[in-house]
């Protein structure tokens, strides 16, 4: 079943609204006018893009040229849910943790944040005096648009990565209490991105959105595969699983993205003359713990962007009364453990794309992850992705007088909090 690529309904627009959004996004804006049979022709320049409109006067022509531009700009500037100001900051959490640990030989200090390449960088140092003499020392780097943000991000990184802090936790021996998946300073993540482009307008924007966050921000190793046949894709999956198993020490997590047309049976491949699909179970089978035993206990996340049926999902009114070290302790983990799957839509329903952003689900994942990953784990961020995709009116559309929406969903056997951690290699 093909993904629906109908245009979203643009809100009423004006040049002033376009100008304000362009300034917010730091996009250069300019308007040129020419005499036209209808009066005036306005050419609106937004960065490298141009839009035209005609009218009996310059104002009317300018506003008409702004209509499509406003739609695109407003979509790219969609606000994502803000975290409540009452939540504890990473600096506060780290201070409270150190107080609870009551370790007099444990010291935490911050170096003054310095400006580097247009952003601030703060170094946090954790030192533990050893009983036999000497010190264990860790450094954790945080970056941000301000000194305060850089300091908080360094504390957030320490809370996720510090082996000194982890050594004092879980005295009971339970592997899950208060824990997140570990990421050593020498490790990064591995991302495999599979994109089918046939009859999928704006598909390349999905790749750009994912690469922009996973590779440019997180410094993950990213591999892109475009338009494979099923046999080719199966081979890529097997080779990737082998690589992860053979190089498990280099990676702390695996992420997989696949974008294409689909139905209730899976995602369509590009086999000529055949309508073949690859099911999610076929993909997962390569990455379960019994297939890549060296990767056991590490998180594996799968993001599936495709239709899962032909139905349109209608909206309803909510009632008013709705209230690894070699000598580390080993734990036996279920075969299906430590897997997370995010679907762009619920079973039986369609997924959507838009010319301004590509796939709505992929765009919202990248936008919300980019904003919240330093302090929020994956499953919590996915709640925001679901909320924005399903509830934001700008993603709604009309079908036969009915309002249509898209509802992402997820499935998880994660046993710890999964933070997306930028590599410091």
Image (cartoon, rainbow, N blue to C red):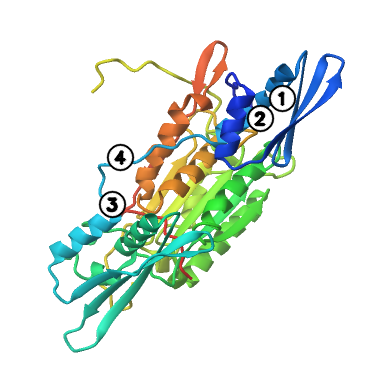
Which quadrant: the N terminus?
A: top right
Element marked by disc 4: loop
Tell me which numbered mark, 4 or 3, is placed earlier along the sequence: 4
- What label does residue 89 carry, if any? 3
Residue 313 spot, x, y in % from top left: 48, 22
Tell me which numbered mark, 4 or 1, is placed earlier along the sequence: 1
For the residues marked 2 and 4, what is the alpha-carbon distance in whole angstroms? Answer: 32 Å
Above-or-below relation of 15 to 280: above
Judged left or right of residue 4, residue 82 is left
For the residues marked 4 and 1, what is the alpha-carbon distance in whole angstroms? Answer: 38 Å
- What label does residue 268 carry, if any? none
- What label does residue 84 carry, if any? 4
Residue that label 2 marks: 69
The answer to the question of whether label 2 and label 1 lie on touching residues, with beta carbons closer than 8 A, is yes
Q: Can you see residue 353?
A: no
Q: Residue at x 52, y 55 (%)?
A: 214
């Amino acid at each position: 079943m093909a993904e629906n690529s109908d245009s979203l309904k643009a809100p009423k627009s004006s040049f002033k609204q376009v100008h304000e959004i362009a300034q917010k996004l730091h996009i250069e804006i300019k308007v040129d006018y020419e005499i036209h049979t209808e009066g005036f022709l306005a050419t609106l320049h937004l960065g490298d893009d141009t839009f035209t409109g005609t009218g009996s006067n310059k104002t009317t022509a300018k506003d008409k040229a702004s209509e499509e531009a406003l739609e695109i700009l407003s979509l790219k500037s969609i606000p994502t849910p803000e975290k409540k100001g009452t939540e504890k900051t990473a600096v506060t959490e780290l201070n409270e943790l150190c107080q609870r640990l009551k370790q007099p030989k444990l010291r935490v200090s911050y170096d003054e944040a310095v400006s580097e390449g247009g952003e601030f960088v703060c170094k946090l140092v954790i030192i533990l005096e050893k009983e036999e003499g000497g010190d264990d020392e860790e450094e954790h780097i945080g970056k941000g648009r301000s000194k305060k943000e850089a300091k908080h991000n360094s504390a957030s990184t320490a809370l996720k990565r510090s082996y000194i802090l982890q050594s004092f936790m879980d005295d009971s021996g339970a592997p899950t209490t208060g824990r997140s998946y570990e990421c050593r300073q020498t490790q990064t993540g591995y991302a495999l991105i599979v994109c089918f482009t046939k009859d999928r307008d704006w598909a390349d924007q999905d790749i750009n959105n994912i690469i922009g966050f996973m590779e440019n921000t997180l410094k993950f190793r990213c591999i892109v595969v475009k338009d494979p046949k099923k046999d080719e894709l199966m081979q890529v999956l097997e080779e990737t699983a082998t690589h992860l198993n053979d190089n498990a020490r280099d990676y702390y997590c695996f992420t997989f993205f696949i974008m294409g047309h689909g139905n209730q049976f899976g995602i369509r491949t590009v086999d000529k003359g055949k309508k073949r699909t690859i099911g999610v179970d076929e993909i997962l089978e390569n990455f379960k713990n019994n297939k890549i035993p060296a990767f056991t206990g590490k998180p594996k996340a799968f993001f599936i962007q495709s239709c899962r049926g032909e139905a349109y999902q209608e909206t309803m009114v909510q009632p008013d009364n709705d209230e690894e070290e070699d000598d580390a302790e080993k734990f036996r983990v279920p075969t299906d453990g430590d897997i997370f799957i995010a679907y762009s839509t619920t079973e039986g329903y369609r997924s959507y794309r838009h010319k301004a952003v590509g796939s709505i689900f992929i765009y919202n994942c990248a936008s919300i992850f980019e904003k919240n990953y330093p302090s929020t784990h994956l499953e919590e961020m996915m709640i925001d992705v679901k909320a924005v995709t399903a509830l934001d009116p700008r993603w709604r559309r009309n079908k036969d007088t009915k309002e249509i929406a898209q509802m992402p969903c997820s499935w998880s056997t994660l046993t710890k909090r999964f933070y997306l951690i930028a590599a410091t290699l």
